[in-house]
Image (cartoon, grey):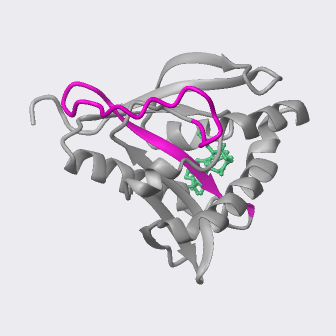
Amino acid sequence: MTDLAWRIATEDDIPVLHALMDAAISGPLAAFLTPEQVQASRLIMGVDSQLIADRTYFLIEIDDQAAGCGGWSYRITSYGGDHTPGREPAPLNPGVDAARVRAMYTHPDFVRRGVGKLVLSLCEAAAREAGFDRVELVATLGGEPLYRACGYDDIERIVDARGGAPVPLIRMGKTIRPASA
Ligand SMILES: CC(C)(COP(=O)(O)OP(=O)(O)OC[C@H]1O[C@@H](n2cnc3c(N)ncnc32)[C@H](O)[C@@H]1OP(=O)(O)O)[C@@H](O)C(=O)NCCC(=O)NCCS
């Protein structure tokens, strides 16, 4: 059984996060896309330093190595990195809007060991704690099996062509507190 440790990421982790995301895009994500779509994905994915500043971003470690990362947000932006156009930092309204799950990546050396599942449970618990009763995310084709396994349903299929090649994405969501609670 793998020991997964987690902590809130800080600005000091940013170089490690860049390397982790780069490895995840070249590794597990590349299995689902053409090389052109992988290149295009780099423009619409990556480190969002707002999540780190907000202290809503988690780093997962296995044997003191960076194994994965991901976070949640109370801001409108639904996906993308610092370099992606269309940031919308205005806050969402808990109980009305869905919180976002953002920027999930597992290093290729640590896939299928429960890292992604742990990040999702941390995000859902934190969003619930902040008063949200629903979470939504924009999934890559590489992320879809994880989210489906964790109870997320499709909202809509979209295509983002801002990086050059058209990259298929799926908006997905999950209720995290029964309406009657
Ligand atoms: C998506 C990603 C974060 C999943 O991370 P992970 O740590 O391997 O996920 P987990 O080990 O927690 O998987 C939990 C369950 O999800 C499902 N799952 C995850 N990845 C899967 C895959 N590639 N194929 C089929 N099912 C998968 C399985 O049911 C798995 O349970 P199991 O291993 O016991 O069968 C990782 O593949 C990744 O970094 N991909 C590239 C970056 C990316 O596209 N991120 C998503 C952005 S929206």
On the picture, is 78 further left or further right than 43?
Answer: left
Residue 118, relative to residue 31: is it above or below? Answer: below
- The quarter of the image holding the C terminus is top left
Residue 89: in magenta span: yes
Residue 42, relative to residue 92: is it above or below? Answer: below
On the picture, is 31 further left or further right than 63?
Answer: right
Tell me the quarter of the picture where residue 76 sits. top left
Residue 52: percent from left, percent from top: 46, 57
Q: Is residue 1 visible?
A: no
Residue 108: percent from left, percent from top: 74, 61
Considering every residue shown, the one lying at the far left of the view is 180
On the picture, is 24 further left or further right than 52?
Answer: right
Q: Which residues are magenta?
A: 80-108
- The quarter of the image holding the N terminus is bottom right
Considering every residue shown, the one lying at the far bottom of the view is 63
**Of 173 and 9, the residue lying toward us:** 9
Q: Could you tell me what secondary structure mostly forms the magenta stretch?
A: loop
Name the residue rendered at 47%, 65% in the picture. Answer: 9
Name the residue rendered at 73%, 36% in the picture. Answer: 43
Residue 25, relative to residue 164: is it above or below? Answer: below
Name the residue rendered at 9%, 30% in the picture. Answer: 180
Tell me the quarter of the picture where residue 23 sits. bottom right
Residue 98: percent from left, percent from top: 32, 30
